[in-house]
Amino acid sequence: MSNNPDPFDSIHATLQGTPTRRGWYDATCPNCGKEVAKGQVHFGYNAEGAGKCFCCSWSGGPNKLAELLRIEIGEYVAPVRVERPAPELARWRLNPYELLRRYNTHPGNVARWQAYKPLSAETIERHGLGYGPLPFQRDNGDWYMSRSDWLIVPIYQDGALVALRGRNTGDRGPKWISATGSEYAFWNVENVPAGAICWLTENYVDAIWLMQYRPDWWAVAIGGATTWRSEWAKQLAARKPSLVIVALDCDLPGNGGGHLRDELIAEWIATHPGAQIPKANGPAITNDLLRLGMTARLFEWPADAPAKAGVDWLLAESQQEN
């Protein structure tokens, strides 16, 4: 084997990915076959040849990726890492109060939110939901506000604002996006009281709607099926809820598909031959909670629940019945 310290050219020639921000490339996943689609998780690789799929959870460095692609890159020698200083805190996080005020007082705030989900004005105010442009940072370090307005969900950790998550209200671009410098955090976990019945959902807004519908229940949200971090189980255990109901969406990466699992697996195999079936994250989260001695159960989706149904589907069905 010849020594080739830069495998990127061979990997890039094979995957032919589309360049994105900050040195990454989007491409069809060579493991599960998930194609790139705006607003959906997919596979990406960087300028060093390392890749990761946020759909099937495959990840690996240049050697592992080359093996998956069945290409020859030689004996890869990783470059010497130079320690970089920790990135500065995003500018908007230093003093976010004026930005939040503008979001909360936007003249279209309540109407925009109510066009998305049936939330009351009181609920919108209680959870600090807003509307407006998000702050982003260009590669040269300059900050700017987006041209588009987003439904804004502020996310706190230890009492500090750590993320601004935006929900798209149009039909172009990603469904959800984060302001530059946002950190993933376990939404609303700090407010769960001891002894509460607590639902664990994917979508922040579904959790909010659930608590509006059933004020005697509490809800937390993780932002997506694949975003769970095991340390979050400890945060929830510290709140001492009486029961946690893990209700990720009714699909393979969520709660596993429930009654539709065999059908969804068959569909996946037909459309992604030879690819790994996505891991069901709901059972894994439930096990993390059980290992800490918590009372937790995986929500069983009813037989009439469609594929990809979320807690919002349950709530919409309940309101129709009432």
Image (cartoon, rainbow, N blue to C red):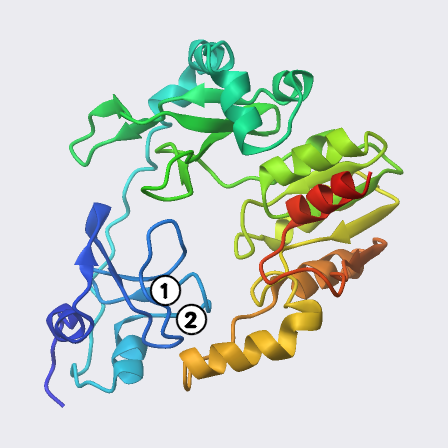
Residue at (62, 28) in percent of width and height: 158
Kind of residue at disc 1:
Lys
In the image, 208: left or right of 308?
right
Kind of residue at disc 2:
Trp
Q: Are marks 1 and 2 in contact (CB under 8 Å)?
A: yes
Image disc number at residue 52: 1
Image spot of residue 273 (x, y percent) = 41, 85
Residue at the extreme bottom of the image, as rendered: 1
How far apart marks 1 and 2 lie (CA) works out to 6 Å
Q: Is residue 94 above or below residue 261?
A: above
In the image, 151: left or right of 117?
left
Quarter-wise, where is residue 246 in the image? bottom right
Residue at (37, 33) in percent of width and height: 181
The quarter in which the C terminus is drawn is top right
Quarter-wise, where is residue 266 in the image? bottom right
Q: Is residue 306 above or below residue 227?
A: below
Q: Which residue is mark 2?
A: 58
